[in-house]
Amino acid sequence: MLGLIGFMALFAIMLIGARVLGVGLPDETGLSPQALVLPAFNRHVVLISGHAGFDSGAVCTDADDNVTLTEADVNARVADLAARRLRRAGADVDIFEEYDTRLEGLDADVLVSLHADSCIDATGFKVAYHVDTSTLLDDQRLQQCIEQQYAAATGLSLHPNTV
């Protein structure tokens, strides 16, 4: 009996070690394992899924003017994938709607509003922050970090002066 308990304890320790190191099989969405990231561990991150609960945002249509994609749908998918990845890194993540009532008085370490913007023939990304804030230097550092990491991870170029 002790042998079985010892084996189970060893197996549990191995699973925990694999989780910390990010070793394992991809999940059902195809995301590869994510190691714990100490700067993210136990941080409260809020993602605003742009246009959720408010409107569709930008709308893509086909030649017959049928809606094929909405910005709100893209934002929701990106928010879900980002939340999964952040949770796997150790963060406590909430996804809010565009004008979520929980935003008032929010106490979070990071707040990011996700928007896909439009369906024009352009690729790239931009990162912006509100300039009227008490955390301006932190916001600027986060912007620079996101710009560098997102460009490296996606291969997309920065387009800071787009919508």
Image: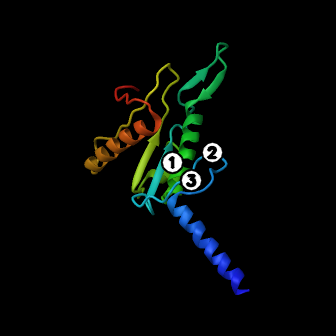
Looking at the rendered structure, the number of numbered marks drawn on it comes to 3
**In screen coordinates, is 123 left or right of 30?**
left
Q: Is residue 30 left or right of residue 57?
A: right
Dot 1 falls on a residue whose secondary structure is loop
Outermost front residue: 3
User: How far across and down, in percent of the image, does residue 61 sit?
Assistant: 62, 20
Please name whichever residue, 124 or 111, is drawn nearer the observer in this view of the structure. Answer: 124
CA gap between label 1 and label 3 equals 31 Å
Where does the image place residue 83, in percent across and percent down from the top left?
A: 53, 50
Residue furthest to the top in view is: 63
Q: Contact, CB < 8 Å: mark 2 with mark 1?
A: no
Q: Circle 3 sits on which residue?
A: 33
Judging depth in this view, the residue of 16 and 47 nearest the camera is 16
Residue located beneath label 2 in the image: 30
The chosen color scheme is rainbow
Instruction: Calculate the distance from the C-alpha at mark 3 to the C-alpha at mark 2.
Output: 9 Å
Q: Please state, as top left, top right, bottom left or bottom right, where the N terminus lies in the image.
A: bottom right
- Vertical position of residue 21 compared to residue 137: above or below: below
Q: Would you name the residue on which mark 1 appears?
A: 100
The amino acid beneath tag 3 is: Pro
Q: Tell which tag, 1 or 3, sits nearer the viewer.
A: 3
In this rendering, the answer to whether 107 lies above or below 149 is below
